[in-house]
Image (cartoon, rainbow, N blue to C red):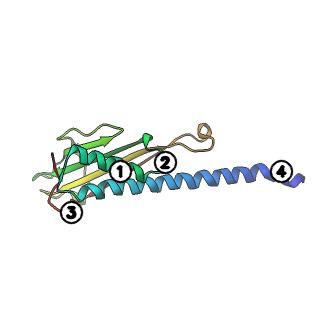
Amino acid sequence: MIEFACVLPFLVLLFVGGFQLMDAISAYRKVGSTVRTLADLTTQNTVITDAQADEILNASRQVMAPYSPSSAVLRISQIQVDAFNRATVSWSRALNGAEYADGTAVTLPAGLRQPGKYYIFSEITYTYVPRIAPTFIGTIPLTQTLYMSPRSSAFVAYN
């Protein structure tokens, strides 16, 4: 009985820590799935409107379930690379955050800087709040980005 009383706090800590670790990993995987969903749904269009972009952003929030999307900033943007290899935002739409202004300079990975190319840039920033003892552990910021080429056309026109 004495041995069990001595080991019990360690076992409880191990159980709670393992649960929190697996929950945080699950949230990180949901963030990755969401950023891919944003890019995938956007690249399937040849023309996109405000309503369609908002629909994609709202649909991607469903991918986050059971995690609350209220603390997630979702953003889709199109990046254009000009003849001088300068990358700028041609349009942007966001949920729970600010959009990029048209013409904003973007730093692309070297392999993507090809003159005349367009990319859909999706990004998510999610603040993970632990379910057990959030004040003790603190929040964990999770961020993912993804570049994807449009599928059906050279670029996705924005109306």
| Residue count near mark 4 (Cα–Cα under 10 Å), binned few <14, some 14–19, many ≥20 | few
Q: CA distance from mark 4 to mark 1?
A: 49 Å
Q: Say what amino acid the circle numbered 4 marks.
A: Cys
Do the numbered discs 3 and 1 sit on residues whose CB atoms are within 8 Å?
no
The picture places residue 108, in percent across and down from the top left corner, at: 25, 52
Q: Residue furthest left?
A: 83
Q: Are marks 2 and 3 in contact (CB under 8 Å)?
A: no
* Image position, residue 47 (x, y; %): 16, 53
Which amino acid, by three-letter code, is at mark 1? Ala
Q: Earlier in the sequence, mark 2 or mark 1?
A: 1
The picture places residue 155, in percent across and down from the top left corner, at 16, 56
In the shown orientation, is residue 96 left or right of residue 18? left
Question: Which residue was labeled with disc 1?
Answer: 59
User: For residue 98, what is the image quadrant?
Assistant: top left
Q: Which residue was labeled with disc 4? A: 6
- Which image quarter is the C terminus in? top left
Toward the viewer: 62 or 108? 62
Say which element carries label 4: helix
The amino acid on which the numbered mark 3 sits, given as a three-letter code, is Arg
How many residues crowd mark 3 within 10 Å: few (<14), some (14–19), many (20+)?
some
Q: CA distance from mark 2 to mark 1?
A: 14 Å
Point out which mark residue 151 bears. 3
Q: Which residue is mark 2?
A: 67
SS class, disc 1: helix
Q: Nearer the viewer, mark 4 or mark 1?
A: 1
Residue contact at pointers 4 and 1, CB within 8 angstroms: no
